[in-house]
Amino acid sequence: MKDLSMEQITNQYFDVLQELGNIGAGNATTALAQMVGCKVDMSVPQVRLLEFHELGDIVGGDDQIMVSIFLQVEGDIEGSMMFIFTKATAAHLVNKLMCGMLGIEEENLEEYQFGEMECSAVKELGNIITGAYLNALSGLTNLKIYPSVPQLGIDMAGALLSVPAVEFGVLGDKILLIQTTFSDDVELDGYFILIPDMNSYEKILTSLGVL
Amino acid sequence: MSEVIKVGMADFKTCRGDDAVTTLGLGSCVGIAVRDPATGIGGLAHIMLPDSTEIKNNTNRPKFADTGIEDLVNEIVRMGASRSRLVAKIAGGAQMFAFGSKSDMIRVGERNVMASKKKLNQLRIPILAEDTGDSYGRTVIFYPKTGDFVIKAVGKSEKTI
């Protein structure tokens, strides 16, 4: 196992990782629906193993401005996790969450400038969504998983994604991305990136009984 | 017609004439632009990690500062540039998230910049300008003919170094 590369692991256990992603994203969607107080549908998440240079195109271009939540994971497994979504999605959700108090117009979501209040709301959204995701993973594997306080970043997709990419870069030449489309009355795009370190992969797969 | 060639993460591209090379959204990665002013031959490398010798899976040479810059320079020289005339500009190496973490990976931007400078020094290529560090992403365009290295960032005015 120690000699396996990241690529070999992900190819071999792709279905398992896809199922983990499914359950995690499902939980996250439920949490999101409870928080914004309306029905949220979720598409079947797509799990992709991408080359680094493909990453930006998938999320709509390297220079597309995105909002991301990044946190470290500790406990039985170690690594980090990122949830990244478009600025329009973030603005829409914040609007919902704050019951329209900020007066964000749905037509101008892309242009909306995030202030302190909005950033704080987005951070909380990210906290809940990633927390629900990790809870599902923890429940499934019986492993203790403690997330750190999330960090918020609003910048070009390529720049944000370079952070998890670098962590994957240590392990191999590809990155594992879980794409989920949520929708309430509008379509919302979000992407999860979970980056366990090498030992943690082993632990996850072992605890699921597939290794 | 001049063309702008896109360089992806862990890759490098070269060009000449009126063409330019660009890379979008540099975060903790570093963009290293190298050119020969006399011939106008140049290129841009987009490296992700500082040192290929620190990592077991190191066959992807453009991913690392040391091997990536070496390959870029060799390619430029192979295209007809003179090794002794080469000059460089660098950008990127931001710290996108402010973690006070034990992990070395978090400071990877800073380490990428240091490793890039070290490699360029080793190859005796002078660094004419840099725009590195801080905490925001950068999109860069490099024109080997003029040496202009244009840097764009979200919410900031465009600058040329």
Image (cartoon, coloured by chain):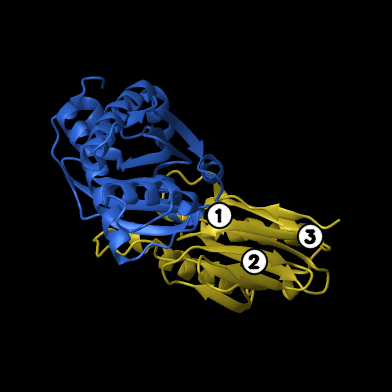
Chain colours: A blue, B yellow
Q: CA distance from mark 2 to mark 3?
A: 14 Å
What crowding class fits label 2: few (fewer than 14 Cα within 10 Å), some (14-19), or many (20 or more)? many
Chain name for mark 2: B
Choose mark 2 or mark 3, whichever is in front. 3
The 10 Å Cα crowd at callout 3, few under 14, some 14 to 19, many 20 or more, is some
Residue type, mark 2 in image: Ala
Please name which of the two marks, 1 or 3, marks the residue nearer to the observer: 1
Which x, y percent locates residue A47? 42, 29
Quick one: SS at disc 1? Answer: loop
Q: Residue at x 38, y 34 (%)?
A: A182
Disc nearest the viewer among 2 and 1: 1
- Residue A113 appears in the picture as rendered: yes
For disc 1, the marked residue is A63
Tag 2 and tag 1, C-beta contact below 8 Å? no
Residue A189 location, quadrant: top left
Q: Amino acid at mark 3?
A: Asp
Quadrant where the C terminus of chain A is found in the figure:
top left
Of the image marks 2 and 3, the number of the one nearer the N terminus:
3
Q: Are marks 2 and 3 in contact (CB under 8 Å)?
A: no
Marks 2 and 1, how far apart at CA: 19 Å
- In this view, which residue lies farthest toward the right? B1
Horizontal side of residue A145 vs B75, given as left or right? left
Q: Are marks 2 and 1 on the same chain?
A: no
Identify the disc placed on residue A195.
none
Which residue shows up at 22% across the image and 44% down it? A128
Identify the element where label 3 is drawn.
Answer: loop
Mark 1 belongs to chain: A
Disc 2 target residue? B33
Could you say where residue A203 lies in the image, as x and y percent from the top left?
21, 32
Rendered location of residue B15, percent (x, y)? 76, 58
